[in-house]
Structures are given as C-alpha cells and as structure tokens.
Image (cartoon, rainbow, N blue to C red):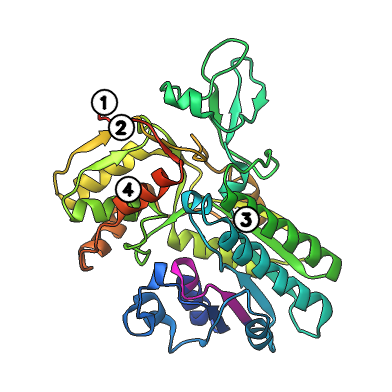
Amino acid sequence: MKVLITGGAGFIGSNLSLHLHSLGHEITVLDSLSPQIHGTNPTADSPLYSAIKDKVRFIKGSVTDVSAWRDALLGQDAIVHLAAETGTGQSMYEIKRYVEVNVGGTACLLDLLTNEPHSVSRVVVASSRSIYGEGKYLTPHGEVVYPIARTDAAMAGGQFDHIDAATGELLTLVGTDEDSKLHPASIYGITKLNQEQMVLTVCASLGIAGTALRYQNVYGPGQSLSNPYTGILSIFSTRIKNRNPISIFEDGLESRDFVFISDVVQATTLALLREGNESKVFGIGSGKPTTVLEVANALVHAYGIDVPVNTTGAYRLGDIRHNFADLTRAKTELSFEPKVSFAEGIAAFTHWVNSQSVQEDRYEESIREMKNKGLFKGQNKNK
C-alpha cells in the first residue's frame, strides 16, 4: 500500500512511518518540520527526521499549502492525517494558528479529495481525548453525567474535583467511551473535534473508509524534550535533569491516560488496515488513569535525582480534571490490546532520556506566557 502520513516526521508519525515501512508499505511524509518540535536546524539536528529520511519520500511543506497536498497525494492509497498544532494551553492564545493548521489544513485535504482525481480509499485522522473535555462520571445514584468545565471561582477556592450538585458528594470517574458527550474545553479540543467530524462526514459521502482515533496522552522514547507546551513527561524530565523543582498544578490528583508509543502505532496500523469502508471512531489509550503526582514521583525515582515535587494549588483555565479511555470498542472491533504497562513505559522512556543531552528548561517561559494571557491562575504556593 502507498500511504501518505502528514506530520510523519513527528513523534507518532516517525514511529508509524518506520513501522509501516518495515511491513513493506511505501511511505510518503508531508511535514513542515516545525521548530517547536524539531529545533531550528531540523534537517541536521532532528533525530525524528533523521530516523525516517532515508526510508520515506519526504516533502517539506505545510498542510495549509494546497500545492504541497497535490504533490503528496499523487498515487496514494491511504492517508494518515497526524499533522496538527498541539497543546491545550498554547491553543488558548494562538487561536488563529491552531484553527488555520488544524481545521484549514484538513479542509485543504478534503477539498482535493472531493474535487480532484485521486486513488485514496481510506483516511485515518488523529483525533484526541481533548474533544470530550471532562471525562465520564457517575453520580452517587449511578446516573451518568458529563460535568461542564470547572469555573475559575471554584478552582480559586481549591475545589478541583467535580461534585454532585444534588448531594454535594464527589462524582465517580469511569472510562470515557466513544458515545460520551463531546464538549471540548480548549481551542485545541475544538479544532480536533472539527477535524474528526470533517473527515468522517466527507469520507462517508465519497465512499472512503474514514477512521478517527481519539488518542489519549501518548508518550515514549523520541518525544520532544524541548517543547514546554505539551507532554508532562517531557516537561517534568527536563525539569528534573536541570535539577529544578517540579511544581504540579492543583493538588496533583488530576489524572490522565498515558499510552505508550508502540501501542499507539499498533492501534493506528490496525485502523489503517481494517476491513470495510464505514466511518468509525475509536478511543485509544491504556484504559487506566494515572495521577500527575504519580507521574512526577515515578520520574524522580527513575532518574535518581532528588528534586522537590510540590503541589501548588495553581491551575490553568481549560484544563480538565480526569479522563481515561474505555477500550471496549477498540478491543472488540480493532482487536487492539495495549501491551506496555505504565511501569514498563516509564522505564523505557527514562532509559532513553538518559541517553539524550540535557535540554534547556523553558517551562517557566511557558508559564509566563499563560500568566500574561490570564490563563494561569492561583498563588503557586507549595501545600
């Protein structure tokens, strides 16, 4: 199969490119080599690009460029559309860029598929758990509820958990399935929802197999250690390696679903090769929640560098409290089964980080940007 992977030089894309190449598929990559991910001299210095450059047909270009799309689409059987601006916090003040790339870039693709000759029979788009906003919960009486975004006033008062309005008791977190309510709490989440809906709608009208994969928090060897806007494992690792304290938002008990890169590659390959041409959506994760405090302590232990880990009570507007994937559909219809536990994944990730040069810690710079935009709140005092 001839497969075009947009964002194919990125973290997920490069791993997927190498895997599909190893299976005998012919890979074309369209990637802008963003400095935020690849550095200022990517063709010389980016290990992600270096890993794929001799194994794929590489096109440097933006998904907002129609001519780059035309070049990349020639002769392709399938597309995995990963290219996107990522980062919840940054999306809240770089709104135009996120919309232009994520929504506009997808529109360019779909416009060409609709109006010009091509040989594409299937499209897989990278969606995100961020389209759900908060995860799925149960009331004390067992009713399913989907809480709205937490208010500034509640979090300023230290109320980070969701409570039942009728009883005042805590809601119980359960796995978020594909039929859960979609109510994104950030511009990034809105653009990913738009991407997903656009791809599934247009592909269905064209008889193309359209699949959206709602990735949870993907991590592993090769992810950017220099991007301070996304990926808490990278952010915390860079802080620890620079022997700087880790300041955790809220009370540290907020949780995420961390899924290892090889499991995401497995799921994406299964989606690409699935039978049938009906539109499908799958949640992809580990199926287990892990608190941010657990992540920080696991990294400190793995590196053997004793830096303070502080819960601060500070918070970011647009952040969710909890979300983890219910994998029932992915297991049943894709035969997807995550293989890497969090403990195994952390060991592999930190072993790789130890082989890398220590990156400049730009975390405080990112916090200053959010403060300047009014998105970072709280006194930032240690509890």
Q: Are marks 2 and 3 in contact (CB under 8 Å)?
A: no
Q: Are marks 2 and 1 in contact (CB under 8 Å)?
A: yes
Q: Secondary structure at mark 1?
A: loop
Residue at image mark 3: 192
Spatial distance from mark 2 to mark 4, Cα to Cα? 26 Å
Q: Residue at point 67% right, 45% down?
A: 178
Spatial distance from mark 1 to mark 3, Cα to Cα? 35 Å
Residue at image mark 2: 312
Q: Secondary structure at mark 4?
A: helix
Q: Secondary structure at mark 3?
A: helix
Q: Give the residue type at disc 3.
A: Lys
Q: Are marks 1 and 4 in contact (CB under 8 Å)?
A: no
Residue at image mark 4: 343
**Of tags 2 and 3, which is closer to the observer?**
2
Q: Give the residue type at disc 4.
A: Ala
Q: Locate the C terminus and report the quarter of the image it occupies.
A: top left
Q: Secondary structure at mark 2?
A: loop
Image location of residue 39, percent across then percent down = 35, 73
Image location of residue 167, percent across then percent down = 58, 10
**In the picture shown, does residue 112 fall above or below 295?**
below
Spatial distance from mark 2 to mark 3, Cα to Cα? 30 Å
Q: Give the residue type at disc 1.
A: Lys
**Of tags 3 and 4, which is closer to the observer?**
3
Magenta-drawn segment: 3-13
Callout 2 crowding tier (Cα within 10 Å): few <14, some 14–19, many ≥20: some
First-in-chain label (3 vs 4): 3
22 or 145, nearer to the observer: 145
Callout 1 crowding tier (Cα within 10 Å): few <14, some 14–19, many ≥20: few
Residue at image mark 1: 383
